[in-house]
Image: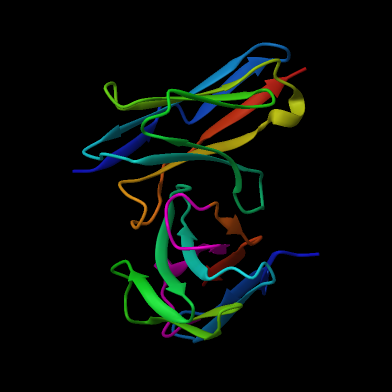
Amino acid sequence: DTAVSQTPKYLVTQMGNDKSIKCEQNLGHDTMYWYKQDSKKFLKIMFSYNNKELIINETVPNRFSPKSPDKAHLNLHINSLELGDSAVYFCASSPGGGALDTQYFGPGTRLTVL
Amino acid sequence: SQKIEQNSEALNIQEGKTATLTCNYTNYSPAYLQWYRQDPGRGPVFLLLIRENEKEKRKERLKVTFDTTLKQSLFHVTASQPADSATYLCALANSGNTPLVFGKGTRLSVIA
């Protein structure tokens, strides 16, 4: 029973391409997140959605566009990929959106831009 | 500027000893602090949450302290085992409605 799942696990692509990463949670949580973990291992929040509504957008380039078709799904679309986008992207969910909530992370998607 | 620092990138310890990891912060007034474990190739897994009015929290062999005067949290793994080897991340938030901010983590290696 996978709680938070992401596809694909690995993504290798050329600069300039457009790609999407999908995320689904079966925990019934209201809030979902996208995090980026770079080569220095910093885990940084990019977006959070609460019940399909964007709550947090942390100065992410507008080439990144999250989409939440329903509260169990949060997809990330990236346009015009750049070398600096190479990182591991984690999806997470939590029951509410507060800092008291435990966050449940997916397995990550390792994106490599060549 | 705001900073979260986990004192060392890596910590090696002999099996059976207590590992102590440090999380220091600057220019935050965190109401909550969480600790996560991350294994290679996997997402972080929640371990413990401690609030600003709590001095200490325990879960099995894990203990977390939170000193808002020193602006520091300590994470202890007692009777450490090789299976405790992982990266441990601290994360804090100024209030219940603000997002968690993560430290870079400390990689703990427990040597048999």
In percent of width and height, residue B66 lies at 40, 26
Q: Look at 70% across and 19% down and name the residue there.
A: B80
Quarter of the image where the C terminus of chain B is located: top right
Q: Position of residue B87 (x, y in %)?
A: 58, 37
From this viewpoint, which residue is outermost toward the right?
Answer: A1
Quadrant housing the N terminus of chain B? top left
Vertical position of residue B21 compared to residue B89: above or below: above
Number of marks drawn: 0
In the displayed structure image, the side of residue A25 where residue B70 appears, left or right: left
Would residue A61 be seen by someone viewing this image from the given angle? yes
Left or right placement of residue A46 versus residue A95 in this view: left
Q: Is residue A17 magenta?
A: no
Residue toward you, A54 or B58: B58
Q: Is residue A28 above or below residue B16?
A: below
Q: Is residue B104 visible?
A: no
- Residue A95 shown in magenta: yes
Tell me if residue A74 comes above or below residue B13 in the rendering: below
Examine the rendered structure and indicate whether residue B65 appears above or below residue A69: above
Taking A70 as reference, is B78 left or right?
right
Expressed as whole percent of the image width and height from the top left, the position of residue B89 reads 50, 39
Specify the color scheme: rainbow
Q: Residue furthest front?
A: B53
Q: Which x, y percent locates residue B64?
A: 51, 26
Q: Quadrant of residue B61?
A: top right
Q: Residue at x 31, y 34 (%)?
A: B25
Q: Which stretch did the figure color magenta?
A: A77-101
Q: Quadrant of residue A48?
A: bottom left
Q: Identify the residue at horizontal 32%, vertical 75% (top origin).
A: A61
Between A55 and A22, the one nearer to me in the picture:
A55
